[in-house]
Image (cartoon, rainbow, N blue to C red):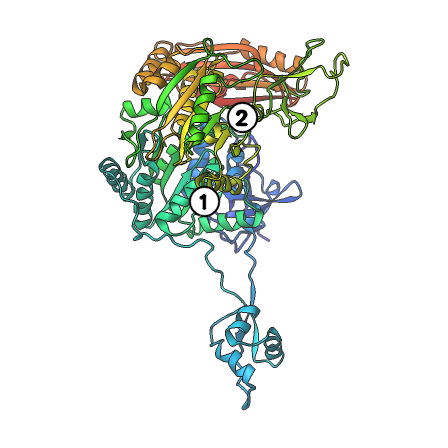
């Protein structure tokens, strides 16, 4: 007998960090599978969900080595545009494609059929000649073709649930599944938005025109804090929805969504879909399915939302585009701002990058003509920009044991006396960043990291903010045993709160930090309390620096304006300027004028001088000139290689091997290896190498060839970070 013809085969990409990429599977007779279909396949004796991928299967593989696809899932297929995006991200970041796919298939519960709710419908049987009044009322409330749940049916008929059950027993009604209702209401596109000023209206017109077309474009939307950038891009969202497409808004901190949601609700009358780590499993699965079905027309979320299965994505907004929170440092290392531009290109969509203090990378792209730029030069309405002043701590230092200088204390008291709100800002969580023994000088460190443990006095514990290790605050020094010798060094927001309690005992205080605002609900309650004037003094970390609108806040005091300038970070001045500019922008956003006081030991530093003078453009020009000659980003390329292992010797050996085989060519320079600033992190010893290249050099092929020359032991990990933003 002739052998049956071989079954067709397809490559399948699995959401696993496998270097091999796709695996080939056979298509069983009668099964129809196309690229993009989600499929279940066997792998190592267990079922795995993957995606039928593009390309040809390997015809040289023997038939006996292949396994059949188990089934095709009943979910919308992954679009060709999203598949190309997955491949592009993998190639750019030098990550296994399956590791990138895992971010797009991060919700396995979404692949299960949605649970149908049980209800009742009329049977086809003929009605009896005589019906009791309750049963007649019940059937009148349930016309043919309608399905109602027990409670809803009883309420509509004015009867008890027992009558419903009795009617079912008599064969008058039968069980039926309730129709699935959309979980996200459609935004009201004709609802009037706020009155826009001339600059806002002109910017909104430009953006709505771009959003109404099916063409790729990138626009940088800048403007002073409080200039109405959100209201402007909400018009672009409306234009996108009117064109029948979906919109995605990325926020760096999901806590920022509290007031953003209020603005969205006021503009469109409904809530958008949300996507963040606080979502429960059922809501997450329902949201994934609603996005894939096109039912969720607007979604706001964290960076991972970029990999959701939008069938027709027409607009991506990256709000606060300069924020480093958009960079993912673990697993697949990518920058959501940059990948948003790539996804918009694949989707033929509009991308809007929004910031009052844009990154130098984005500014350089706008100057080069790769991005369009729109600028809002003034605050909306009658609000003016706050007056910024630097307080020289060398001349007016705080009293011993305190951290608030007398001029700042006096201004806070004056602000409170006027019935206005004040804010104290310090970008440091906890009570103190270091605990020191006065007897032997021992500094308490994390056992897993090269980092000091931060005291959290309220919880009576010491915590590592890098790995999460925590331990009770000891009563005695763990090194010398001296009792009552441990002392906190330096301030955190808890310590500033303690000082503020002593200085302003009548003030109603609120601490805003990631420890005290763990999610959107807590952030929304904080925003409500501040707006309702139930708070006099806000004390916060960087979570208060952006996105908030506090109309009664007139004074911002920065406790340690020099904090971000220490160390050798390439972007230290840029980040410090952005952070302080953003937190300054919280003051004076209504009729009352705002004031900002920067406590500094270096008031002559260019960052402080630019903030005081309001010389933003001059600061960016100087920062660009400082980087351009050395081909530092954005005028050159950087790639970090982080070698880590549980054994220091193993990590050091591989780092040396990489340095020995490093590429040598024009336009390329390799620095290192050197121990990372955090040379021990989560129990792993770390060494860093840095590849520096001219902007026109394609670094990915060079990196692939370089890494192929060195054998990496199974106990050692090499993480590739293209375009690093952190150098720890």
Q: Is residue 462 above or below residue 152?
A: above
Q: Nearer the viewer, residue 278 or 655?
A: 278
Q: Is residue 109 above or below residue 86?
A: below
Among the 4 quarters of the image, the one containing residue 357: top left
Q: Is residue 97 visible?
A: yes
Q: Which mark is residue 309?
A: 1
Instruction: Give the CA distance from mark 2 to mark 1.
Output: 48 Å
Question: Which residue is at a point 49% across and 49% down the rendered structure image?
Answer: 287
The tag earlier along the polypeptide, 2 or 1, is: 1
Residue 273 drawn at (x, y percent) = 45, 47
Q: How many marks?
A: 2
Which of discs 2 and 1 lies nearer the camera? The answer is 2
Question: Which residue is at a point 41% across and 12% down the rendered structure image?
Answer: 603
Q: What SS does tag 2 mark?
A: helix
Residue occupied by mark 2: 500
Question: Which residue is at a point 44% across and 52% down the rendered structure image?
Answer: 293
Q: Nearer the viewer, residue 434 or 106?
A: 434
């Amino acid at each position: 007998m002739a052998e049956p013809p071989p079954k067709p085969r397809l490559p399948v990409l699995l959401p696993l960090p496998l270097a091999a990429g796709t695996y080939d599977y056979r298509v069983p007779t009668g099964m129809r599978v196309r690229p993009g279909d989600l499929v279940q396949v066997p792998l190592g004796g267990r079922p795995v969900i993957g995606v039928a991928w593009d390309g040809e299967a390997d015809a040289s593989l023997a038939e006996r080595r292949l396994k059949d696809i188990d089934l095709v899932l009943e979910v919308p297929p992954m679009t060709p545009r999203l598949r190309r995006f997955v491949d592009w991200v993998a190639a750019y970041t030098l990550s296994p494609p399956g590791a990138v796919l895992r971010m797009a298939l991060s919700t396995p519960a979404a692949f299960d059929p949605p649970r149908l709710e049980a209800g009742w419908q009329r049977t086809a049987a003929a009605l009896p000649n005589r019906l009791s009044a309750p049963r007649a009322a019940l059937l009148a409330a349930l016309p043919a073709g309608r399905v109602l749940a027990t409670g809803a049916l009883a309420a509509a008929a004015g009867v008890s649930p027992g009558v419903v059950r009795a009617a079912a027993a008599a064969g008058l009604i039968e069980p039926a599944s309730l129709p699935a209702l959309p979980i996200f209401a459609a935004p009201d596109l004709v609802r009037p938005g706020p009155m826009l000023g001339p600059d806002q209206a002109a910017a909104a017109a430009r953006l709505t025109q771009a959003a109404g077309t099916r063409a790729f474009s990138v626009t940088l939307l800048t403007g002073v804090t409080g200039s109405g950038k959100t209201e402007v891009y909400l018009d672009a969202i409306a234009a996108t929805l009117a064109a029948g497409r979906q919109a995605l808004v990325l926020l760096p901190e999901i806590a920022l969504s509290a007031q953003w949601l209020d603005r969205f609700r006021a503009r469109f009358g409904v809530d958008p879909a949300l996507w963040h780590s606080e979502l429960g499993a059922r809501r997450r699965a329902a949201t994934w399915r609603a996005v894939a079905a096109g039912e969720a027309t607007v979604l706001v979320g964290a960076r991972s939302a970029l990999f959701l299965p939008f069938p027709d994505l027409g607009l991506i907004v990256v709000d606060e585009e300069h924020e480093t929170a958009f960079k993912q440092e673990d697993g697949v290392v990518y920058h959501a701002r940059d990948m948003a531009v790539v996804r918009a290109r694949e989707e033929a969509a509009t991308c809007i990058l929004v910031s009052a203090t844009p990154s130098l990378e984005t500014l350089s792209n706008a100057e080069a003509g790769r991005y369009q730029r729109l600028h809002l030069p003034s605050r909306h309405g009658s609000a003016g920009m706050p007056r910024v002043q630097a307080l020289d701590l060398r001349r007016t230092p705080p009293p011993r044991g305190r951290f608030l200088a007398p001029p700042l204390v006096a201004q806070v008291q004056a602000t409170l006396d006027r019935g206005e709100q004040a804010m104290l800002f310090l970008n440091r969580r906890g009570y103190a960043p270091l605990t020191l023994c006065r007897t032997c000088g021992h500094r308490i460190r994390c056992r897993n990291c090269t980092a000091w443990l931060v005291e959290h006095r309220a919880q009576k514990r010491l915590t590592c903010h890098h790995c999460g290790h925590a331990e009770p605050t000891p009563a005695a020094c763990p090194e010398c045993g001296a009792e009552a010798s441990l002392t906190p060094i330096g301030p955190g927001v808890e310590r500033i709160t303690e000082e503020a309690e002593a200085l302003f005992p009548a003030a109603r205080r609120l601490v805003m930090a990631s420890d005290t605002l763990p999610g959107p609900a807590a952030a929304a309650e904080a925003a409500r309390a501040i707006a309702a004037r139930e708070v006099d003094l806000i004390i916060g970390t960087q979570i208060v620096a952006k996105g908030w609108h506090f109309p009664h806040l007139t004074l911002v005091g920065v406790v340690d304006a020099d904090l971000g300038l220490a160390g050798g970070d390439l972007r230290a001045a840029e980040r410090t300027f952005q952070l302080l500019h953003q937190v300054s922008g919280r003051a004076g956003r209504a009729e009352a004028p705002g004031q900002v006081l920067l406590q500094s030991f270096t008031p002559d530093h260019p960052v402080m001088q630019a903030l005081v003078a309001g010389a933003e453009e001059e600061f960016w020009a100087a920062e660009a000139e400082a980087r351009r000659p050395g081909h530092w980003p954005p005028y050159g390329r950087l790639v970090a290689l982080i070698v880590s292992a549980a054994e220091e010797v193993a990590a050091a050996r591989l780092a040396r091997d990489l340095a020995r085989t490093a590429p040598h060519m024009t336009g390329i320079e390799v620095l290192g290896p050197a121990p990372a600033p955090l040379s021990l992190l989560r129990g792993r010893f770390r060494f860093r190498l840095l590849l520096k290249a001219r902007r026109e050099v394609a670094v990915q092929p060079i990196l692939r060839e370089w890494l192929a020359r060195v054998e990496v032991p199974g106990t050692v990990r090499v993480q590739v970070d293209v375009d690093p933003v952190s150098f720890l």
